[in-house]
Amino acid sequence: MISFLKSALVLGAISSASAFTSVNTNGAAKSSTSLNAVYGEPREVQIIPSVLPADFGNLGADCKRLEEAGCHRVQFDVMDGNFVPNLTFGPETIRWARKYTDMPFETQLMVSERCTDAMLDEFTEVTKGPNGEPGVVIVHVEACTHLHRALGKIRAAGGSPSVALNPHTPAEMIENVLDMVDHVLVMTVNPGFGGQAYIPTMTDKIRKIRKWIVDRDLDVDIEVDGGIKATKETIGACAEAGANCFIAGSGLFAYDDLSQGVKELTELAKEAQGVAVAA
Ligand code: DX5
């Protein structure tokens, strides 16, 4: 059936606009009119705020606000002033934030190799859920000479391993560890600061990694981070290319009503995936 439809499309026998309606993994009908179609089955759209624009003097309360707004998890941007030219916080801050919310956490380690090696277990521990559920721990390929070992360590310590790539880093640097991670984070800005512009050339890197994941039948989400807004050019382009987890800092905190921001970001991503959005 599928090969018939593909050959029919190739032969132009059926106009792609009304080609077909199929059911995706979320059980939702793919929009029959949408020309957008992510490669493979669309994965669940997840909106994940970065805490960088939050009130650091009241971080726990802001995390609770994000939970109530319907965010899937919250990202803690750990910066050591070494790997990136900015400084934020350590594991104690994340441990305190856990007292305010049961929302899943993720920790992005924008820190040097020495810090990664010395503190990986502690970051894995504080990122866990309220009942010890695995939290997402993201190490940068550029900060890990022994990336395979670091990812194995996160899994062994009860965390959910993820690997991040800076904009200049080719996708091939993570091709051999794709089977070890639950997420890949494609940085769409140079890490270190919020409020920067999305780098459009990252879209092809997302598409390449998505193809590897689908063709190898891996259960891996693609996250994007940096300059993500409720626009077709940013979250739309990333979703169509294959990302399904979207980090939003300034793009979400710009909304007075955070839940409205989550709704608009989600709808644009689903539309770009070719998934029908409930009216
Ligand atoms: C930058 C951080 C991002 C940043 C995103 O190094 O990793 O998470 O906070 O902020 P926006 O969405 O404003 O680009």
Image (spheres, rainbow, N blue to C red):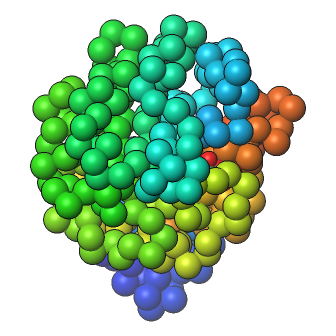
The outermost residue toward the bottom is 11
Q: Nearer the viewer, residue 160 or 190?
A: 190
Counting from the top left corner in percent of width and height, residue 110 is at 44, 49
Residue 188 visible within the image: no
Q: Quadrant of residue 239 in the image? A: bottom right
Q: Residue at x 36, y 76 (%)?
A: 170
Q: Position of residue 93 (x, y in %)?
A: 51, 22
Q: Which quadrant does the N terminus fall into?
A: bottom left
Q: Nearer the viewer, residue 8 or 100?
A: 100
Residue 17 in the image, given as x and y percentages of width and height: 63, 72
Q: Give the residue displayed 71% in from the left and 39% down from the top.
A: 53
Residues 132 and 264: in front is 132
Question: Which residue is at a point 61% across and 72% down the rendered structure image?
Answer: 199
Question: In the rendered view, does 164 fall on the left or right side of 160?
Answer: right
Q: Is 164 in front, or is 120?
A: 120
Position of 190 relative to 84 (above/below): below
Q: Quadrant of the C terminus?
A: top right
Query: Can the viewer see residue 8?
Result: yes
Q: Is residue 53 left or right of residue 74?
A: right
Q: Quadrant of residue 129?
A: top left
How far across and how far down the image is residue 237, in percent? Answer: 61, 67
Q: Residue at x 42, y 82 (%)?
A: 8
